[in-house]
């Protein structure tokens, strides 16, 4: 079945309350009109997502923020100017315009302006902000291509195909405190990137502030193990697939997907979910192994995704 549609068709569908998958620079989103509670409800239904897990609202103009937020903290403007459009979500007090279903009843809303021309054109053409989680079934591997979306969500009303995404893992999520900013989810934009604009607040955010941060997430349907040292290697390699970074552990595996010949963490992040999808789909592989990476810079975001994918 071909679910691929063009931007005008997708925009029209969104205005009519339908749910459309679209590319962003991070992963594909499952979008609906953020101001239409019935349309947003369809996202939760399609994704089989629990209602306590709030959605991110995507905008195409920085000024749209003012409609969706109740008196935005002025400290965000230098950050927005530096990082939007881009893979950074900012959690702010919500305005009355934002339906409760979007925020799971929280008084705050996560907002971002994606750095993807198709996403921006779609939001402008639809004329409404788009609530969009990643376009996968709840807890499963995030999609970095239109094919990944079609595999998990064949029931979606339409898919805008923008090829493979450029960043590959979900946006960094921050919130402001009196002391500075807290990171609710790690991504390409790191603490070090943000610190020139606002001090980092090391207080760990509590559960109420960061819902949806479950220990298991982004999971393939097959068992996944992490490989840090020799003791993590399989005893039987015959149906084991490896997602490799250094090349150090490649020998013996039935299949190896090398994520970065140049050992570039950014490249690992971009290709990680596609590698997980490919091993999940491979009938000759029963168990997935993934090499761990140093927890520095974007390595933090990678290790966060790897731990959640391998959590049982
Ligand atoms: O890169 C991304 O952020 C992708 C693309 C599609 O934009 N979206 C994405 O959405 O990853 P999702 O639904 O998979 O993750 C959204 C997470 C929620 O699980 C929650 O932890 C956090 O964002 N979030 C959203 N609104 C929030 C709020 N008001 N307060 C705290 N956390 C919030
Ligand atoms: Mg997700």
Image (tube, grey):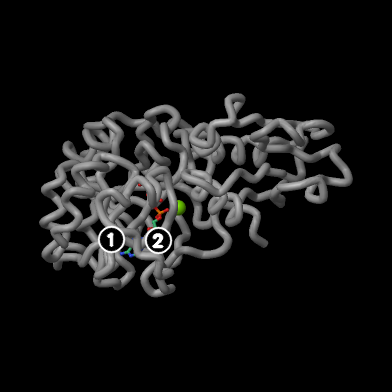
Q: Residue 142: percent from the left, percent from the top?
A: 50, 46
The answer to whether residue 283 is above or below residue 178 is above
SS state under label 2: strand
Whether the residues at callouts 2 and 1 have beta carbons within 8 Å, the answer is: yes
Mark 2, ligand 1, within 8 Å: the answer is yes
Give the quarter of the image for residue 311.
bottom right
Left or right: where does residue 109 sit relative to residue 61? right
- The total number of labels drawn is 2
Identify the residue at image location x=40%, y=70%: 203
In terms of depth relative to the viewer, which is nearer, 22 or 307? Answer: 307
Which labelled disc corresponds to residue 184?
2
Say few, some or many: other residues with alpha carbon within 10 Å of mark 2 (under 14 / 14 to 19 / 20 or more).
many
Which labelled disc corresponds to residue 13?
none
Please give the residue where the numbered disc 1 appears in the rendered image.
91
Q: Residue 66: percent from the left, percent from the top?
A: 11, 56
Mark 1, ligand 1, within 8 Å: the answer is yes
Say few, some or many: other residues with alpha carbon within 10 Å of mark 1 (under 14 / 14 to 19 / 20 or more).
many
């Amino acid at each position: 079945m071909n679910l691929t549609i063009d931007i005008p068709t997708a925009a029209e569908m969104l205005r009519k309350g339908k749910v459309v998958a679209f590319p962003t620079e991070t992963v594909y989103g499952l979008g609906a009109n953020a101001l239409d509670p019935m349309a947003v409800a369809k996202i939760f239904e399609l994704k089989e997502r629990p209602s306590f897990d709030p959605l991110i609202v995507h905008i195409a103009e920085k000024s749209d923020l003012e409609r969706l937020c109740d008196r935005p903290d002025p400290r965000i403007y230098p950050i927005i100017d530096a990082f939007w459009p881009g893979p950074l979500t900012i959690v702010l007090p919500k305005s009355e315009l934002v339906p409760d279903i979007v925020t799971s009843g929280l008084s705050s809303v996560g907002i971002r302006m994606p750095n993807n021309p198709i996403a921006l054109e779609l939001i402008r053409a639809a004329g409404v902000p788009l609530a969009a989680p990643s376009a996968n079934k709840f807890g499963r591997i995030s999609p970095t291509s239109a094919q990944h979306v079609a595999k998990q969500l064949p029931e979606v009303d339409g898919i805008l195909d923008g090829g493979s995404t450029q960043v590959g893992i979900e946006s960094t999520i921050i919130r402001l405190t009196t002391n500075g900013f807290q990171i609710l989810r790690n991504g390409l934009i790191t603490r070090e990137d943000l610190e020139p604009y606002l001090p980092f607040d090391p207080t760990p955010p509590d559960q109420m502030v960061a819902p949806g941060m479950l220990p298991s997430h982004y999971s393939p349907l097959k068992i996944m193990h992490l490989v840090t040292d020799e003791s993590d290697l399989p005893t039987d390699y015959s149906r084991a697939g490896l997602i490799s970074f250094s090349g150090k552990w490649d020998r013996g595996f039935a299949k190896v997907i090398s994520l970065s010949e140049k050992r570039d963490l950014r490249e690992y992040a971009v290709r990680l979910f596609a590698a997980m999808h490919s091993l999940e789909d491979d009938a000759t592989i029963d168990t997935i192994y993934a090499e761990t990476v140093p927890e520095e810079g974007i390595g933090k975001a990678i290790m966060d995704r790897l731990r959640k994918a391998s959590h049982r």
